[in-house]
Amino acid sequence: MEEMVNVYFYGKKYTVPAALTIQTAMEYAGYTLKRGVGCRHGFCGACATIYRIKGKNELKTGLACTTQVQEGMYITQIPYFPTDKRTYDINDLKANQQVMMELYPEIYSCIGCNACTKACPQSLKTMQYIAYAQRGDLKKCAEESFDCIMCGTCSVRCPAGISHPMVGLLARRLNGKYIEPEAKHLTKRVEEINNGDFDAAMAEMMAKPIDEVKDLYNNREIEK
Amino acid sequence: MYAPYNDSMMESVKKVEATRAARMATEPRRLTADEKDDLLSKFHPDYNNDSFDEIKVGPNKGQRAPIELAKMLHSTSRLVTDKVDLNKIDYDVDVLVIGGGGAGSSCAIEAHNAGANVMIVTKLRIGDANTMMAEGGIQAADKENDSPVQHYLDCFGGGHFAARPELVKRLVTEAPDAIKWLNELGVEFDKDTDGTMVTTHGGGTSRKRMHAAKDYSGAEIMRTLRDEVINLGIPVIEFTSAVELIKDDKGQVAGAVLLNMETGDYMVAKAKTVVIATGGAGRMHYNGFPTSNHYGATADGLVLGYRAGAPLLYQDSIQYHPTGAVYPSQILGALVTEKVRSVGAQLVNANGEAYIHPLETRDVNASGVIRECREGRGVDAPGGVQGVWLDTPMIEILGGEGTIEKRIPAMFRMYMNYGIDMRKVPILIYPTLHYQNGGLEINGDGFTNAIPNLLVAGEAAGGIHGTNRLMGNSLLDVIVFGRNAGKKAAAKYKEVTLGSLNIDHVASYDKELKDAGLETGEVSPMLLPKYARHER
Ligand code: SF4
Ligand code: SF4
Ligand code: FES
């Protein structure tokens, strides 16, 4: 017999196989999911979930698609949370501390409770990346927040009403665009292409009889 | 203990460990063209005729399609019974983009920047798409020893010379500009301290041209594009699917009938140009395979385009990614990025043999895994599944301690979540349904030939990759053809005058189904997979 556990979706009890994730257990119980589901493999952040194990005080957070069910889990999903994204023209911004002060001033109200870090299903140092943003260290903020899947769980728990994933995203875009050094070989190649430098060789390749192309392919040299 | 593997699995792990040093000293041989053909014809699921059905109606009548896709093509439109008033127009735009993934978002950004009034509809949220889940990277020939022509050869040959040359040309020629565009939007590619892109091989590449953002490449691209769409103020109608295209009396595409996924209400979107960017079909579970795809990958765009008269191309060519997770069961089918092999892991069978070069093309490597398992050299795992090893500890030996956490953190996290430390023990894999190589047929500019002003971009389009796609050419394709569709649609709509709207094609297609005696008992497009278990 398959091992079963009792779980509670929005307070209602269901008996489900113990090997399932919260997401597949909901489907086992008969839910057709429309909200709170996306990639199903931990990449999209659609499935933020809060649960408490019966008899325990601690409120836990996780992704429904990657968290296995346990006996006595009381589960609620947070398919949407009103995080507050500010809009901007990335071309008008400068990569400095001022940017954060203007777009996300609430980060300076952080009380250092660390609830965001504790809530993060990606085990990110969320409070730390907010601290980097406060200091205007955008590169560090970008690095520390890189694995963020924007599930919003941290924001649900934040007493200061900070929209952490939006802060991290801004830092990463600024870092990628302005702080990281330019890839000169890329700029050069785009110029060469626009200049038509490869047009003749491409036309020649496309005009070759198929057997010749096959020969070229099968005998092409592969970079070590 | 580095993994919750059972005794028989651990037995095999010991063999893998015993041969590791010797395996690392030699690179497995590449197969010849004939050996590859032989392996494919014996083991690739595309060669298993039992998993295909004949298409009985429409432009591809007489050709084959996966059983599950044929069934959707043979099923009834919602609008045969449900009535919609086409005179009550809810949205009126220049460019209607169906799908909010990488292709749809790039398309909308370019169309907006070219001055068009553009709107995105998407049945889940913007960004809920296979783009978000692409891990490994994106190809572009931007290094000194590389060129778009070399990229063309790799792509065209890897796709068995079946791709449409003019599409491959666009893909490879516009690749460097796609990377530059993304980088300028703020996408953080892996770079050296001097700005040089860190590039690696993928299966079937002859030059190291795989650009990545760790193993969150697609997520990094998608979240940036989504942010830009929002910044530009482009309307995004979420939880709203397109269920049929609308045409006008001249036979031009004229919009789409939309369905609010939450309330069940229909709406009418009128548009001078329409872009189908609905993505793939992994959730159809062709051949009974698990899938690496996101929840919404149900071939909707193929069905509604086909019903309106747009032909498919290579609808019978499916990509099984060689390395899907097969153990533990919670991650069955999840993608184990090809990058794991790019950075050094070999494919190793139960006896500890590196039976193939890890960077053969995907179809070849998938066939290889299936062969090993069928011929008794696979590893049995709990739950009645089989697989071969991906020898991940090699990565740490080759690249130094910490390489796994630095280069493939998502994989490390996915396995650690279930107590498997891939730095210390190999992981078990089996092919997973990953990509539809074919799709709706498009011309070199991204338009369908059959229906004026209808474009297709991203995974829903066919012909770019022939009958096998290379790693890193799909993220590339969604950006290149997404942007292209946006620019082309924005140029086109200005010339379009629409007549009166109709969905007559829905009734005539239904008549064809009836005449052919087809009654599947289902409606299509599918929109959401049927995972809810109702029978007790
Ligand atoms: S930082 Fe916040 S939004 Fe990002 S993954 Fe962690 S909890 Fe989710
Ligand atoms: S939860 Fe909010 S207030 Fe608490 S540490 Fe995190 S950012 Fe600061
Ligand atoms: S469904 Fe995407 S993270 Fe869970």
Image (cartoon, rainbow, N blue to C red):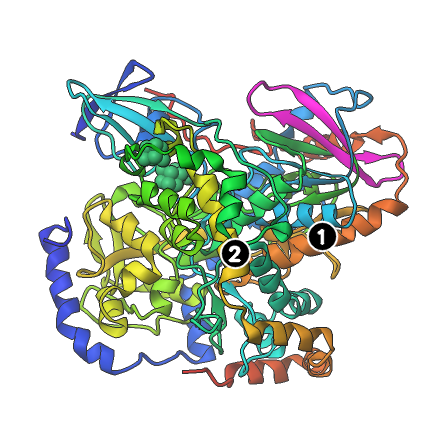
Give whichever of A94, B340 is nearer the camera: A94
Judge whether residue A62 can be spotted in this image: no
Q: What's the magenta region?
A: B246-270
Q: Is mark 1 within 8 Å of ligand 3?
A: no
| Residue A91 in view here | yes
Decide whether the magenta segment is chiefly helix, strand or loop: strand
Closer to the camera, A116 or A100?
A100
Q: Nearer the viewer, mark 1 or mark 2?
A: 2
Q: Is residue B447 left or right of residue A45?
A: right
Measure the alpha-carbon separation of dots 1 and 2. 21 Å
On screen, A16 above or below A85? above
Residue at the disc numbered 1:
B485
Q: Quadrant of ligand 2?
A: top left
Q: Which mark is residue B187?
A: 2
Residue type at numbered disc 2: Val
Residue B191, by quadrant, is: bottom left
Q: Position of residue B480 (x, y in %)?
A: 64, 59
Residue B68 image offset from top left, x and y in percent: 52, 41
Count the labels in the image: 2
Of callouts 1 and 2, which one flags the residue occurring earlier in the amino acid sequence? Answer: 2
Q: Where residue B362 appears, x then y in whole percent? A: 44, 64
Residue A73 in percent (x, y) is at 23, 23
Q: Secondary structure at mark 1?
A: helix
